[in-house]
Amino acid sequence: MIVPQPGFGPGKVILLGEHAVVYGHPALAAPLEWGVVARPLLSDRTSLVVPDEIRGKSRAALKRAFAVAAKRCGSPPVTLFLESDLPVSMGLGSSAAVGVACARSLLLSAGRSAEPEEVARIALEMEKEFHGTPSGVDHTTSAVGQLIEFRRKPGAPAGKARVVSSPKPLKVVIALAGTRPSTRVTVQGLRERAARWPERYERIFQEIGRVALEGARSVEAGDLDALGDAMNVNQGLLSALQLSSSSIEEMVQRLRAAGALGAKLTGAGGDGGAVIGLFANPKRALATLRRQGVHCFDSQVAGPRAK
Ligand code: PMV
């Protein structure tokens, strides 16, 4: 018997290591408290109601991705409706969250178990339709739903995640710094520069990977100052890779002036998108930034939560 079951996929922030992760280096990423819910209704076939705001190429990609997922999940006769709290194309993993929410709902509605590994496998198939050759960090973080150190060795079909536990609450402010190109375009631009000057770029990728591992150890040791410093250094390295912009840099400075222990772009960057700041207590910074007209939110991404 088919019992339609909803599925949730959280958005994500990359605390350390974006882009270098595409070249096989480690990254540190965490789920947000908000994301995408897929709500199913019984139907005569498997289908997805694509929200009106998803247009053009993204709409076509989502339809293709959903068809792949439906087949992998045994095509339960349900129609899925999506509800999202995530800004789209800002670096917060909205497409991965859609994939995870759909995979969970389809698997559960088909009477199958929705273990994170299986959800991640299906969401990866969907991500390939959106991004071409994703590292897998976005959908893995969303499927695991915990702070992870993620690495996909070159040539490996999928990445590996290690859950990183934080003895302290890890809280970030996410500020939006305007629109940005698609991840695919930014990743491709970097790929061209890295192919032209491979040694120089590989040195920077390696350094980013080391900073990500150091950051993971700082989290485990409860050393938020050291994690913040790793984020600041990572921002400098992303800037060296020409992935930052004046609007990103300005937002990074605003977050630091508001007391961030560290601040950097998150996700593909390029020309705008989301910038994150690490705060021991983000509420006052959030109020200050909002008074300045900054579009921002806060989220606890790891560690013990207040009851
Ligand atoms: O799509 P975004 O902005 O969340 O970026 C994903 C992270 C990248 O490292 C830039 C790409 C990837 O496949 O890992």
Image (cartoon, helix red, strand yellow):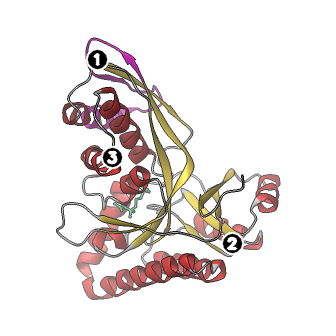
Asked whether, in this view, residue 129 is left or right of residue 186, the answer is left
Near-viewer residue (2 or 161): 2
Of the numbered discs 3 and 1, the one sitting upstream in the chain is 1
Name the amino acid type tagged 1: Met
Query: What separation in Å lies between label 2 and label 3 (alpha carbons)?
Result: 41 Å
Q: Looking at the image, which is closer to me, 88 or 157?
A: 157
The CB of the residue at mark 1 lies under 8 Å from ligand 1: no
Question: Does the stretch in magenta take in 57?
Answer: yes
In the structure shown, which secondary structural element does the residue marked by tag 3 occupy?
loop
Identify the residue position indicated by label 3 in the image. Answer: 115
User: Can residue 194 be seen here?
Assistant: yes
Q: Tell me if label 3 and label 1 are in contact, CB under 8 Å.
A: no
Neighbour tally class for label 3: few under 14, some 14-19, many 20 plus, Cα within 10 Å? few
Residue at 76% in and 72% down: 259
Query: Measuring 25% from the left and 36% from the top, which residue is drawn there?
Result: 69
Q: Quadrant for ligand 1?
A: bottom left
What secondary structure is found at the residue carrying circle 2? helix
The location of residue 70, given as percent across then percent down, is 24, 31
Could you tell which of marks 2 and 3 lies nearer the N-terminus?
3
Q: For the residues marked 3 and 1, what is the alpha-carbon distance in whole angstroms?
A: 20 Å
Please tell me whether mark 1 sits on a helix, a strand or a loop: loop
Q: Disc 2 or 1, which lies upstream in sequence? A: 1
Q: Mark 1 = which residue? A: 1
For the N terminus, which image quadrant?
A: top left
